[in-house]
Image: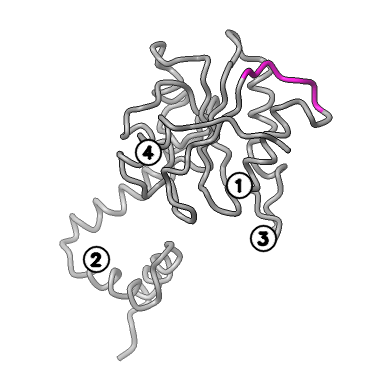
Amino acid sequence: MKVPPSISDLARMFDRLPGVGPRAALRYAYWLASQSKSSVREFATAVSQLAEKITACEVCGVWTDASPCSICSDPRRNNGTLCVVAVSPDVRVLEEAGVFQGRYHVLGGLIDPIEGHTPDQLRINNLLDRMQKADPPITEVVLALDPDVLGDTTAMYLMRQLSGSSARASLPVWRVTRLARGIPTGAQIEYADEATITDAFINRRTNSTN
């Protein structure tokens, strides 16, 4: 039996999602087809609103419906500490742990030379500009990056930039720290539990750029 085009087209969209294969994508499409028309329209409306409303915060880069985001707009946050993460879901995990009260900066990914993801494709220049213009000055930058090869590569690059050892002018930063290895090597921050995140923040340490 030939799959109706409306279902096969939807399955191709589901197949683009991370961790979803062709069979699962087709199963999702058939499941959605079995729902009431009002439920399908509700699903479609949610996707449409995502396309229309979601945007990157003009300050930190996190995905938000309003820019600046709620964190950047909160006057109670500590302006002296900046937490650098790879992607927006990492901010959500850290916020749920409730151990960090500073500001965030989302890079938009990690440096990956093999895949052609170079520093100029990330929000690294935005970070350095933000550091230079910060008033009051930022006194600590916490690198909350995945403890794997890509995370370590990106962290080392950022530490060199923030230490003033690059061609850029020296930046007014007292400390550059990384999350302690409470998060297992190879794991992703997005899937860490609150206890692990808390231990990692409490035990963060200063890394040498050498």
Measure how far apart labels 2 and 4 are at the Cα level.
Answer: 36 Å
Residue 197: assigned label: 4
Of the 4 image quadrants, the one containing the C terminus is top right
Q: Assess whether mark 3 and mark 2 are in contact (beta carbons under 8 angstroms).
A: no
| Residue most extreme to the top | 136
Look at discs 2 and 1 and give the one toward the viewer. Answer: 1
Residue 28 at x, y = what percent? 28, 69
Q: Which residues are magenta?
A: 168-174
Would you say the magenta stretch is mainly helix, strand or loop?
loop
* Residue 166 image position (x, y, % from top left): 80, 31
Measured in 3D between alpha carbons, the distance from the residue under mark 1 to the one under mark 3, in whole angstroms, is: 16 Å
Residue occupying the point 50% across, 14% down: 79
Q: Residue at x 58, y 30 (%)?
A: 206
Q: CA separation, marks 1 and 4? A: 18 Å
Q: Are marks 1 and 3 in contact (CB under 8 Å)?
A: no
Q: Residue at x 33, y 79 (%)?
A: 4
